[in-house]
Amino acid sequence: MVRGARVAEAPRNCGSITAVPDVEKITIIEGPPPTFEIVGDGWLLGLAEGAAPSQVAVCRLRTLNGPALVERCYRAWRDGQAMHLEYRSDDGLTQQAPVVAARWTHLDEGHVLTLWVRIDIDDVEVDIDFDEDEDEPDDAGFDLTS
């Protein structure tokens, strides 16, 4: 989509604006905010390059039509447009993250859309989760001297 904009009577040495491209986006309309997992795969290194330090993260979303959403991404990239993921953060504010890769998979419950997005390093929060297995014995009686 192209939204038209014109500059009336621009001076000769100034350019004129003929078209401003819309930003394509995939919007999450219901459910909790997406969970982003930082990834360090080698093929993603070139996708994280830019003027500001960033990191590539992956998120997985349930959708009704994964192939159509991936096709929208491909069309936007082919036409030189950016694709963004629009979502609400935990505090209810609308956020956007540039999508750098997309893929869909089919499960029995429906389609899952996997998006790799670029996020600013300053926005990364580290959440350390220790999974404790209830079946493992308690180490309270462990003797370090033996």
Image (spheres, helix red, strand yellow):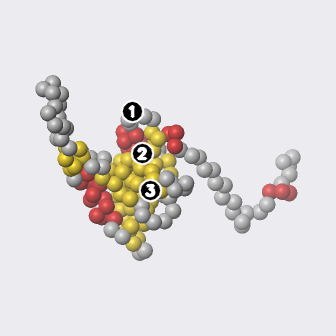
Q: Distance between the residues labelled 2 and 1?
A: 12 Å
Instruction: In this rendered view, identify the residue nearer to me: 76 or 143.
Output: 76
Query: Residue 110 at what x, y percent from top left?
Result: 39, 72
Query: Residue 102 at what x, y percent from top left?
Result: 35, 55
Q: Mark 2 points at which residue?
A: 118
Amino acid found under the numbered disc labelled 3: Tyr
Residue at position x 40%, y 40% in the image: 48
Instruction: In this rendered view, identify the residue nearer to me: 34 or 140.
Output: 34
Position above or below: 11 against 54: above
Residue 51 — which label?
A: 1
Residue 99 — which label?
A: none
Instruction: In this rendered view, identify the residue nearer to me: 117 or 142.
Output: 117
Q: Name the residue under label 3.
A: 87
Q: Which residue lies furthest to the top in this view?
A: 13
Query: Residue 55 at what x, y percent from top left?
Result: 46, 42
Q: Which of marks 3 and 1 is nearer the N terminus?
A: 1
At numbered mark 2, what does the secondary structure look like: helix, strand or loop?
strand
Amino acid found under the numbered disc labelled 1: Ala
Q: Is residue 75 left or right of residue 104?
A: left
Q: Can residue 20 be seen in this view?
A: yes
Residue at position x 37%, y 42% in the image: 47
Residue at position x 12%, y 26% in the image: 12
Residue at position x 33%, y 68% in the image: 65
